[in-house]
């Protein structure tokens, strides 16, 4: 386990460089002056989904007041300077998770939280959702001719050569999204190698396209020999190869390649406070150049992590190793002191993402926050594996809706609900499926429903959004 280090959340021991000019980003400072909001259109241009795992402390994530006049308490306080750009939601039920009859609580929640679907087959050896997650549906509609369509980044976790296979975002059944979790891998994959000349870059693209052509030819020869199910899998693989070849041939355009310095001994799988700043910068920079119109950012170190950069704020370690095996054990023990420090840091990450968008222009010269819908939601409303009464935050371009609102669907006051042993089994007044239906409608869709078709998941958009 790494020891605590002095840090002001976004580490100040290194600076980021953009386009060769040294820039110390004020990501964790509330912006004193944000650009005036531009009239960009009825629909957002882009979607970013931020996911943090292991739930929340429900009362600390629930505002106090009324729908239009409320205070952000405890864990949500880092968002207070952006309150007029937010819709805070309390009490969303993930009904799809409860339809499953197999799998553990984490599998049931993770695979359904953004897909709105139960397992395709109730078989523990074949756990996969019965459909894509909502942001994939949107990607297919708005990606256009962007080089990547969607960009998926993860903070923390191991993985093969800087890649992480998620169990929350899916392109379809049996098709999980693969995210990049090494910032340097993401930088090279998205922006190219800054040390390669234009001529060498062109030659490299040509060689890669030739290889992909050869692989596609082999798949076409193989297809007649396969059964119907295998053909479907092969066709999905061929589609991805075709999209990859289109990106390779198109090149990377003229977008400035971010560059940055990291502290000595930096470990992308563990130093989340460093990684998350780099990933936010990569994601916003890429989307500002219209490399993609959908992005995801997932904080994956939710099991065995010590969060040492938060020790000073907590007055010591987040959990006592002599009492708790790890962060996962602490979270599942109901509320324990120290949990709120981590959950508040998650909201600082969200605030930093929003601030970074607010200070950036896109390829059209428009303010990024004005044109982007940002969605945050965990998979649990409590470490006790509750999949009902989830919180969510929407920020930025809210479609036809306006910010500065709180939509409260909780069946009981948050502190009362949290205190009840059966609180996680009491239905709220709205569902995650309704939220995703609303989001698809914000982008111009005519969707009447998203996710599982089941009496427990009512159709239509989220009331009041």
Image (tube, rainbow, N blue to C red):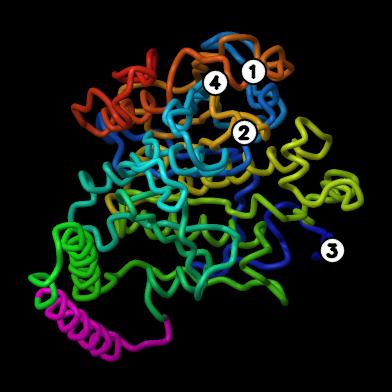
The segment highlighted magenta reads 194-220
Tell me which numbered mark, 1 or 3, is placed earlier along the sequence.
3
Q: Nearer the viewer, mark 2 or mark 3?
A: 2
Please tell me whether residue 200 belongs to the stretch shown in magenta.
Answer: yes
Q: Which mark is residue 90?
A: 4
Q: Are marks 2 and 3 in contact (CB under 8 Å)?
A: no
Q: CA distance from mark 3 to mark 4?
A: 36 Å
Tell me which numbered mark, 4 or 2, is placed earlier along the sequence.
4
Residue linked to disc 2 = 385
Q: Is residue 250 above or below residue 90?
A: below
Q: How many neighbours does mark 4 have within 10 angstroms: few (below 14), some (14-19), or many (20 or more)?
A: many
Residue linked to disc 1 = 423
Query: At numbered mark 2, what does the secondary structure look like: helix, strand or loop?
Result: loop
Please tell me whether residue 60 belongs to the stretch shown in magenta.
Answer: no
Residue linked to disc 3 = 3
Q: CA distance from mark 2 to mark 1?
A: 11 Å
Q: CA distance from mark 2 to mark 3?
A: 29 Å
Residue found at x 29% / y 19%: 460
Q: Is residue 408 visible?
A: no
Query: At numbered mark 1, what does the secondary structure look like: helix, strand or loop?
Result: helix
Residue 309 lies in quadrant: bottom right
Q: Nearer the viewer, residue 445 or 159?
A: 159
Tell me which numbered mark, 2 or 1, is placed earlier along the sequence.
2
Tell me which numbered mark, 4 or 1, is placed earlier along the sequence.
4
Residue 458 coordinates in the image, percent (x, y)? 34, 17
Q: CA distance from mark 4 to mark 1?
A: 14 Å
Residue 110 coordinates in the image, percent (x, y)? 50, 43
């Amino acid at each position: 386990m790494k020891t605590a280090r002095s840090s002001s959340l976004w580490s100040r021991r290194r600076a980021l460089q953009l386009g060769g000019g040294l820039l110390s980003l004020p990501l964790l400072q509330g912006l004193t002056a944000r650009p005036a909001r531009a009239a960009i259109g009825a629909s957002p241009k882009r979607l970013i989904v931020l996911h943090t795992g292991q739930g929340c402390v429900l009362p600390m994530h629930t505002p106090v007041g009324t729908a239009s006049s409320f205070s952000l308490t405890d864990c949500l306080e880092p968002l207070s300077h952006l309150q007029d750009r937010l819709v805070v939601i309390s009490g969303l039920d993930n009904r799809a998770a409860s339809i499953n009859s197999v799998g553990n609580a984490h599998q049931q929640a993770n695979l359904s939280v953004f897909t709105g679907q139960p397992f395709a087959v109730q078989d523990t050896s074949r756990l996969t959702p019965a459909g894509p997650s909502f942001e994939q549906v949107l990607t297919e509609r708005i990606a256009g001719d962007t080089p990547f369509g969607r960009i998926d980044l993860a903070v923390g976790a191991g993985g093969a050569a800087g890649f992480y296979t998620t169990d929350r975002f899916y392109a379809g059944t049996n098709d999980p999204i693969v995210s990049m979790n090494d910032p340097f891998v993401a930088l090279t994959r998205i922006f190219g190698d800054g040390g390669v000349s234009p001529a060498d870059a062109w030659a490299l693209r040509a060689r890669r396209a030739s290889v992909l052509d050869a692989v596609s030819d082999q798949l076409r020869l193989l297809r007649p020999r396969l059964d119907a199910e295998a053909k479907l899998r092969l066709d999905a693989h061929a589609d991805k190869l075709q999209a990859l070849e289109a990106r390779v041939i198109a090149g990377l355009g003229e977008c400035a390649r971010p560059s940055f310095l990291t502290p000595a001994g930096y470990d992308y799988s563990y130093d989340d406070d460093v990684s998350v700043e780099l990933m936010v910068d990569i994601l916003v920079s890429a989307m500002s150049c219209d490399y993609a119109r959908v992005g995801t950012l997932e904080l994956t170190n939710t099991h065995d992590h010590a969060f040492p950069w938060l020790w000073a704020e907590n007055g010591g370690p987040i959990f006592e190793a002599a009492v708790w095996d790890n962060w996962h054990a602490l979270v599942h023990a109901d509320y324990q002191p120290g949990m709120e420090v981590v959950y508040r840091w998650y909201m600082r990450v969200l605030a930093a993402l929003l601030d970074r968008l607010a200070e950036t222009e896109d390829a059209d010269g428009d303010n990024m926050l004005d044109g982007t819908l940002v969605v945050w939601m965990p998979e649990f409303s409590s470490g006790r594996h509750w999949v009902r009464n989830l919180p969510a935050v929407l920020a930025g371009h809210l479609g036809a809706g306006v910010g500065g609102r709180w939509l409260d669907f909780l069946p009981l006051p948050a502190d009362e609900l949290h205190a009840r042993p059966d609180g996680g089994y009491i239905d709220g007044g709205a569902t995650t499926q309704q939220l995703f239906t609303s989001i698809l409608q914000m982008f111009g869709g005519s969707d009447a429903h998203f996710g599982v078709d089941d009496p427990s998941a009512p159709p239509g958009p989220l009331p009041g959004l």
